[in-house]
Image (cartoon, rainbow, N blue to C red):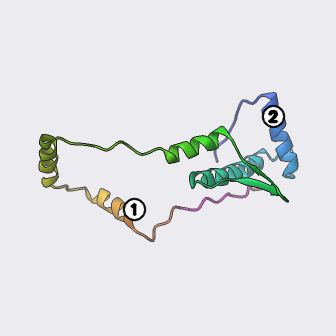
Amino acid sequence: MSRFQALTNSVLDAELEMLRERLGLEPNQKADLLREVAALAGWVVRQAEQGRAIEARRGEEVESLVHPAIERLRSTRQKPIGERLTLSDAETAHLASILDQGFEPTAELRETLTNLANPKRRPPKLRWKKPAL
């Protein structure tokens, strides 16, 4: 298992301590705190990547989660991938000659591409291991 160490300042220490207490963790459960916070942050990032707004509601009161990291995720999602590529007649002919030569990938590459193209393929699920006590 890898070790994680970070230099923190007093503001971050206080925030982490407050989170630890609110989540009902003991002072010696820093790894558990990191797992909990990472799981929550991962969920927030996945929602933002999918273009979903994250809101807190209490009765009629609604507050949206706003953070520079979420804005970065949304802005990269909304940016077009690239500009339209326009080729000259000579470039088009050259590209056609290259494509006409065919492509013979290695057996390993073929197997990898086949696995990636499999519609039943799902990415592995992230599971946290409980620490041995």
Q: Can I make out residue 26 in this image?
A: no
Residue type marked 1: Leu
* Image x and y of residue 42, in percent: 65, 51
Q: Residue at x 34, y 60 (%)?
A: 113
Q: Residue at x 84, y 52 (%)?
A: 23
* Image x and y of residue 20, in percent: 83, 46
Picture layout, residue 39 above or below residue 90: below
Residue type marked 2: Asp
> How many residues crowd mark 2 within 10 Å: few (<14), some (14–19), many (20+)?
few
- Find the distance from the CA under tag 2 to the CA under tag 1: 43 Å
Work out whether residue 83 or residue 50 is closer to the camera in this orientation and state it: 83
Q: Can I make out residue 111 in this image?
A: yes
Magenta span includes 19: no
Residue for badge 1: 116
Magenta span includes 129: yes
Work out whether residue 49 or residue 22 is closer to the camera in this orientation and state it: 49
Q: Earlier in the sequence, mark 2 or mark 1?
A: 2
* Image x and y of residue 69, in percent: 63, 40
What kind of element bears circle 1? helix
Q: Residue at x 11, y 49 (%)?
A: 97
What kind of element bears circle 2? helix
Question: In this picture, which residue range is highlighted in magenta?
Answer: 124-131
Residue for badge 2: 13
Q: Main secondary structure of the magenta part?
A: loop
